[in-house]
Image: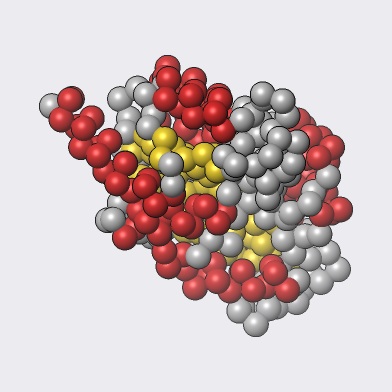
Amino acid sequence: MSIFLDKNSKVIVQGITGAEGSHHTERMLKYGTNIVGGVTPGKGGQTRSHGLPVFDTVKDAVAATGATHTCIFVPPPFAADALFEAYYAGIGTAVCITEGVPVHDVLKVVGTTPGMRIIGPNCPGLISPGKSSVGIMPGHIFLEGNVGLVSRSGTLTYEVVDGLTRAGLGQSTCVGVGGDPIIGTTFVDCLREFANDSQTSAIVLCGEIGGSDEEDAAAFIAEHLPRTPIVAFIGGRNAPPGKSLGHAGAIVSGTFGTAKSKIEAFQAAGVPVADRPSEVPGLLARRIAGMSASQA
């Protein structure tokens, strides 16, 4: 199994006729993602060079293709409408790649679309290696396996995954939840799914300063996943207080959301925290071996 995405997922691309949407549609198709069509208002009836039908609305696309997932590449002012359109068309999982979506727009969508899984916005998407990829992740660095990964940073995801793959530690599903202050899917949401996934036997969390997602994850792990090998990394340790580091949500205000508070929360939950991304594979391998020996 995997979480959120598998070979049976039928994917449409909102904004497929734009430069980014078209480029990444082609990359996802090459990876093997089951993309069944695209949506661009006013361009319904056209056919892209890669042979996919283009529809005027998500409703039309779902009716014609049975799409279950959408990947959104539309400008920031239109991202909320794209998500609402997906929700009312019956889409189950929406991956919003768009960066710069107004916070109040995201709040409105997240608070009024119950039952639709939203990944992002401002995220690299998700991938279940060997099965399907939705978003902009470089598929060639991933290896199918048993490690679930969730991260707030796309670049950090790629660096850690490359190390895991080189160490022979394949991945079940990797989720880039996004680095904005308000996002649709949190670390705890992913941990809850990984806990019920038969393919996932170990987990890596890549967090960063700002917010409380990492502290919430640590509390969930202590209560629900004490026997699962899990390691973490926290980015932004040297960021000055009051200044965002890369992502809009990566900002420390006073003593809230500091790297220190997140590291201490993970350590209190029994989760080792790597000092560098390159240390994650070795730390996880030792964690897996140690917990296997203790449970034998």
Question: Residue 262: x, y in percent?
Answer: 54, 28
What is the quadrant of residue 102 in the picture? top right
Q: Is residue 32 left or right of residue 176?
A: left
User: Does residue 31 sit above or below 143 in this rendering?
Assistant: below
Give whichever of 87, 273 is nearer the camera.
Answer: 273
For image coordinates 67% across by 73% down, the residue present is 22
Residue extending farthest to the left is: 296
For image coordinates 79% across by 34% down, the residue present is 107
Residue extending farthest to the top is: 223
Name the image quarter holding the C terminus. top left
For image coordinates 58% across by 74% down, the residue present is 26
User: Does residue 187 sit above or below 74 in this rendering?
Assistant: above
What is the quadrant of residue 118 in the picture? top right
Asked if residue 120 can be seen in this view, the reply is: no
Question: Residue 62: x, y in percent?
Answer: 67, 55
Name the image quarter holding the N terminus. top left
Q: Is residue 131 left or right of residue 100?
A: left
Asked if residue 151 can be seen in this view, the reply is: yes
Question: Residue 168: x, y in percent?
Answer: 27, 56
Question: Residue 288: x, y in percent?
Answer: 25, 37
For image coordinates 56% across by 25% down, the residue present is 261
